[in-house]
Amino acid sequence: MRMFKGIHAVVAMLVWALPGVAQDQQPMTFFVASDGPGNGGNLGGLTGADALCQRLAASADRGDATWHAYLSQAPTDGLPRVDARDRIGSGPWHNAKGDLIAANVADLHEDRNNIRKYTALNEHGEEVEGRGDQPNRHDILTGSDSMGRLFDPDPAVSTCNNWTSSSDEHTTRVGHHDRLGGANASWNSVHNSRGCSQEALISSGGDGLLYCFAGD
C-alpha cells in the first residue's frame, strides 16, 4: 500500500512540473467593458462608470471584487483631480482567461504591459472588435495621457465634462485596446474623440467602452 502511495505522489509531482499542464487560473481582475451605457460620454460621472464595471463583472461571476473604471477626472466644480492610474489598485491584473496583463502600475504604463487585441478581452473572455473589424470598437474612453494621468485640465477637452456629457461640444481622450492606428498606438491615449455623443464616439471607431480593473 505504501508503494502505491509513493507512486501516486511521484506522478502528482511530475504532472505539476510538466509544461502546459493547467494550474489554478488567476481570477479576472481586468476587462474591457462589453458595452457602455449607450449614452456617449455621459457615464454618470466616475460613480456611474464604476457601477457599470461592477455590474458587468457580476454578470461574469466576479461581482465579489471591487471594480473601478480606468478614467481620469478634471478638477472643476468642486471635484478633485483624479488620475486613472490611482484608481485601480496596485496589481497584478489578469484577464478572463488568466493571462497576465501587468504586474503593477509601473509595468501597466510601460511596454511591459500585455494589452493587445487578443488579451484585452471583455468580462466574458471574448475579443472586442478592433481595427479591420466591422464595427471597429477600439476607441476606449480614458481621459488620460499615456502614463495614466489626466490628459488636460479642461474637462470639456479630455473627459466629456467629467463623464457627464453626451454633447458634441465636448470631447474625450481615448486609447486603442488593440494598439493599432494612431501615431503611438497606445492602449490608453491615442487621440481625442470627435465629440461625446454616442454617434460621435462610434464615428471615430469606438462605442463608449471602458477599461475595468479590480483594485485593492
Image (cartoon, rainbow, N blue to C red):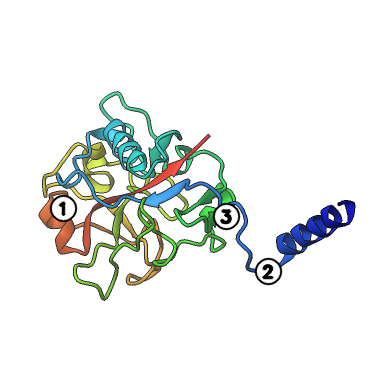
Residue at x 44% of width, y 53% of height = 96
* Residue 65 pos. (x, y %): 46, 35
Looking at the image, do the residues carrying marks 1 and 2 touch, with CB atoms under 8 Å apart?
A: no
Looking at the image, do the residues carrying marks 2 and 3 touch, with CB atoms under 8 Å apart?
A: no
**Which SS class for mark 2?**
loop
Say which label, 3 or 1, has the lower sequence index.
3
Q: Which mark is residue 107?
A: 3
Camera-near label (2 vs 3) is 2
Residue type for callout 1: Gly
Where 85 falls versus 17 (above or below)? above
Q: Residues within 10 Å of mark 2 (few under 14, many from 20)?
A: few
Residue at x 83% of width, y 60% of height = 7
Q: Residues within 10 Å of mark 1 (few under 14, many from 20)?
A: many
Residue type for callout 3: Asp
Question: Which residue lies under the disc numbered 1?
Answer: 195
Q: Residues within 10 Å of mark 3 (few under 14, many from 20)?
A: some
| Outermost residue, front side | 1
* Residue 199 pos. (x, y %): 10, 55
Say which label, 2 or 3, has the lower sequence index.
2
Give left or right: position of 24 versus 141: right
Residue 194 visible in the picture: no
Say which label, 1 or 2, has the lower sequence index.
2
Residue type for callout 2: Pro
Q: How many angstroms separate mark 2 from mark 3 (CA)?
A: 26 Å
Q: Nearer the viewer, residue 144 or 103?
A: 103
Q: How many angstroms separate mark 1 from mark 2 (CA)?
A: 49 Å
Q: Which mark is residue 19?
A: 2
